[in-house]
Amino acid sequence: MMDKVLTDRKVIVFQLGEEEYAVDVKQVGSIERILPITRVPKTPSYVKGVINLRGVVTPIIDLRLRFGMGEGEIGEASRILIVNVDQMDVGLIVDAANDVIDIPLEKIESAGEVIDSANIDYIEGVAKLGSRLLILLDLHKVLEKDKVQLQAMEG
C-alpha cells in the first residue's frame, strides 16, 4: 500500500478552450471566483493586473492569452487558480477548474510524442485517461520570463 503514494500524482484539472490542463495540487493555494482586477500599466496584455486576495496583492495572468489562444469569455465557470511558484503567488485565469484527480505516473508521457504545439516548452507531460487527454503544465516555465515583473507587482 505504501508504494501507491509514489505512483500517483495528484493534480488539479482545469480548462482552457477545449483543452484540459493539469497542475500539481501542491502548487495550487486556492481556486477563486473571478475578482475585480486592477490593471497595471506597462505590462504584457496577458498580465491582467493585480487582485487583493485576503490582504495580499497578487498578480493575475490570463493563461489563454499567455498561450496565444485569444481572449476567452469570462463566464460563470471561470476561475482564478492561485498558484505558488518560487515563493511567489500568481493568479491564473482559466475557463473552468474541473476537478482534483490522481494520475498514475505510468500514464504520463512526454509531450513531444503527443503534442505538436508552440507551447511545448511549458508542458511537462501528457496523460491519457480514458478519452481524456490532460496536458501537465510546468508552471516554472510558464512564469519564468515574467518573474521579475510579477515580483514587482506583488504586494
Image (spheres, rainbow, N blue to C red):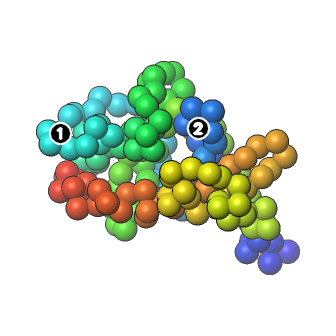
Report crowding for label 2: few under 14, some 14 to 19, many 20 or more residues within 10 A (C-alpha).
many
Q: Are marks 1 and 2 in contact (CB under 8 Å)?
A: no
Q: Which residue is mark 1?
A: 40
In front here: 54 or 23?
A: 23
- Report x, y in % for residue 118: 51, 51
- The disc labelled 2 sits on which kind of residue? Gln
Instruction: Name the residue at 82% across, 42% down.
Output: 131
Horizontally, residue 45 falls left or right of residue 133, namely left
Per the rendering, the mark at residue 76 is none
In front here: 50 or 52?
A: 50
Numbered disc 2: secondary structure: strand
Note whether 118 is above or below 26 in the view shown. Answer: above
**Residue 101 showing in the rendered view:** yes
Note whether 79 is above or below 110 in the view shown. Answer: above
Numbered disc 1: secondary structure: loop
Instruction: Name the residue at 57% across, 32% down.
Output: 17
- Report x, y in % for residue 103: 74, 58
- The disc labelled 1 sits on which kind of residue? Val
Q: Which residue is mark 2?
A: 15
Horizontally, residue 143 falls left or right of residue 19, namely left
Name the residue at the left extreme. Answer: 41
Q: CA distance from mark 1 to mark 2?
A: 26 Å
- Report x, y in % for residue 7: 77, 71
**Residue 63 showing in the rendered view:** no
Q: Quadrant of residue 4?
A: bottom right
Instruction: Name the residue at 49% across, 29% down.
Output: 78
Instruction: Name the residue at 37% across, 68% down.
Output: 86
Quadrant in which the N terminus is drawn: bottom right
* First in residue order: circle 1 vs circle 2: 2
Report crowding for label 1: few under 14, some 14 to 19, many 20 or more residues within 10 A (C-alpha).
few
- Report x, y in % for residue 25: 57, 57
Name the residue at the bottom extreme. Answer: 3
